[in-house]
Amino acid sequence: MSIITEWISYGTEGRWRGYAARPDVEQKLPAVLVLQEIWGVDEHIQDVTRRLAQAGYAAFAPDLFTAEGPKPEALSPDRVERAKQFLNTIPPSAWRSPEERQAALSALPEEEQAKISASLELIFSAGSRIPAFTEQITAAAAFLRGSYAPTAGQGVASVGFCLGGLLSGTLAAKDGELRGAVIFYGSPPPKELIPSIGAPLLGFYGELDPRITDDIPGFAQELEREGKRFEYHIYPNAPHAFFNDSRPTYHVDSARKAFARTLAFLSEVLS
């Protein structure tokens, strides 16, 4: 089966862009929103989008870095890839420490230091732009249901990773028509949103990712009290970003199990 891929614009006057992949068939298809990590719609997220298309869905990954206008040069694919390569050389505990990052950066030429620093500043500040991202992904879901010809009138579910995992849970509270939300190692949405969650949730977390995983049992209890459906799995010996097969954190056993469960969940909620 061949797959059609394209970058498309959506929203008022085409203000946002995203990467779309779907099977080359004539019939309309259910849609899956693929919500990016902090790195953007990079090759890994594009690959996940194509994998979901190969499973029979029209998958769409909104580029969150266009949420506030044109993508800055510091967030171009080449610049983000260089920033990732730099982070691979330091412990994860140092990633969000400006002092520790700068100490490691000081070994690089000044021009390279400046470029990586500018990229990391924007990457790590993504959490401060949740309202803009939420507006963008809510519009993307509406676009898939209403305006995008291959999926118009069909159901929409979301699958998000890290930052996108938080947004997937948030979308379940903001979009009353969302059919289901999958969260890969994303922080829970704010507690005040829990009563508004209408779609079933499925979560995947790593045992070695306490910054995220330690909050999940409490989140599950809050959801249960509100009568919400939430199934979650914590994989032994799995770190944060265990599904990302382009990163040193990839944990193949956990990734395989999580993807199989994701496909079963999507089949259920989008049938």
Image (spheres, helix red, strand yellow):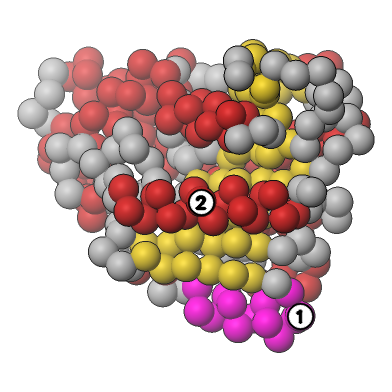
Structural distance between the alpha carbons of marks 1 and 2: 26 Å
Residue placed furthest toward the front: 1
Left or right: 158 in relation to 185? right
Residue 251's place in the image compared with 102, above or below, is below
Q: Give the residue at x 86% y 38%.
A: 154
- Check disc 1 and report the residue beneath it: 227
Foreground residue among 208 and 70:
208
Stretch in magenta: 216-228
Query: How packed is label 2: few (under 14 Cα within 10 Å), some, or many (20 or more)?
Result: few
- Check disc 2 and report the residue beneath it: 260
Foreground residue among 48 and 169:
48
Foreground residue among 63 and 101:
63
Q: Which mark sits nearer the N-terminus, 1 or 2?
A: 1
Left or right: 32 in relation to 99? right
Q: Quadrant of the N terminus?
A: top right
Q: Quadrant of residue 66?
A: top right
- For residue 33: magenta? no
Q: Are marks 1 and 2 in contact (CB under 8 Å)?
A: no
Circle 2: residue type: Ala
Q: Give the residue at x 64% y 55%.
A: 265
Closer to viewer: mark 1 or mark 2: 2
**Element assignment for label 2:** helix
Q: Give the residue at x 47% y 73%.
A: 215
Q: Is residue 94 in view?
A: yes
Circle 1: residue type: Gly
Residue placed furthest toward the left: 107
